[in-house]
Image (cartoon, helix red, strand yellow):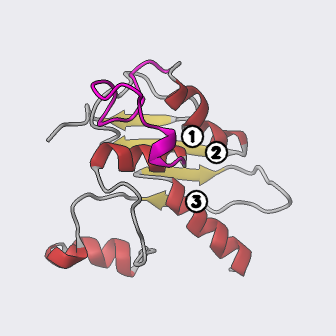
Amino acid sequence: MTTNARKFRILLSLLMPFAVVTSTKTTFHETTFPNFVLILTDDLDLTLGGTASLPKTKRLLTNEGLNLSNWFVHTPVCCPSRAELLTGRMFHNLKTPNASAGCMYIDVSSDLNNTFYSNYYFAQHFKKIGYTVGMFGKHLNLYNPENPPRGIDRWMVNGGGNY
């Protein structure tokens, strides 16, 4: 794998939480993009042992996949952190002006016309370059749409959750 392909693979993995993305025969700048799966887990703090309590998971995903061992989260709170990954935008560009609205201060609603889904959401951008995108598991804590956002081909998410 070339250095540029490796960098692109890492970049894509940074942008995609708990998603399965596969490339079709579409090419972009004469390069076929690789297929990848990104699995985002919560509460595996290295100080508390990280994946030590999950040896099978570690063997299957970390040892035989890619582990981002030097990963820093800009906003280490569930909904804001997930929103940053789903959009590629920093918290200060996603926060709501009204502290009592949104999902843990993220300016989002379950309406797919909300700017979060209509402009920022990652899937539509990947779809344009030929990827098939699936989203499974926990999406956001609140305001999960009933139907998939633009660009999502397979959608099986739960209602989120709150602390």
Report which residue position mark 3 lands on: 12
Above or below, 11 relative to 22: below
Specify which label sits upstream in the sequence, 1 or 3. Answer: 3
Q: Residue at x 35, y 40 (%)?
A: 139
Report which residue position mark 2 lands on: 126
Callout 1 touching callout 3 (CB < 8 Å): no
> Image quarter for residue 38?
bottom left
Q: Which residues are magenta?
A: 89-112
Q: Amino acid at mark 3?
A: Leu
Which of the labelled discs sits on residue 68, or is there none?
A: none
Q: Residue 160: x and y, percent?
A: 25, 36
Q: Where is the C terminus found, in terms of image quarters?
A: top left
**Residue neighbourhood size for the residue with mark 1, other residues' Cα within 10 Å, grouped as few (<14), some (14–19), many (≥20):** many
Callout 1 touching callout 2 (CB < 8 Å): yes
SS at badge 1: helix
Report which residue position mark 1 lands on: 123
Q: Amino acid at mark 1?
A: Ala
> Image quarter for residue 123?
top right
Q: Residue 120: x and y, percent?
A: 57, 36
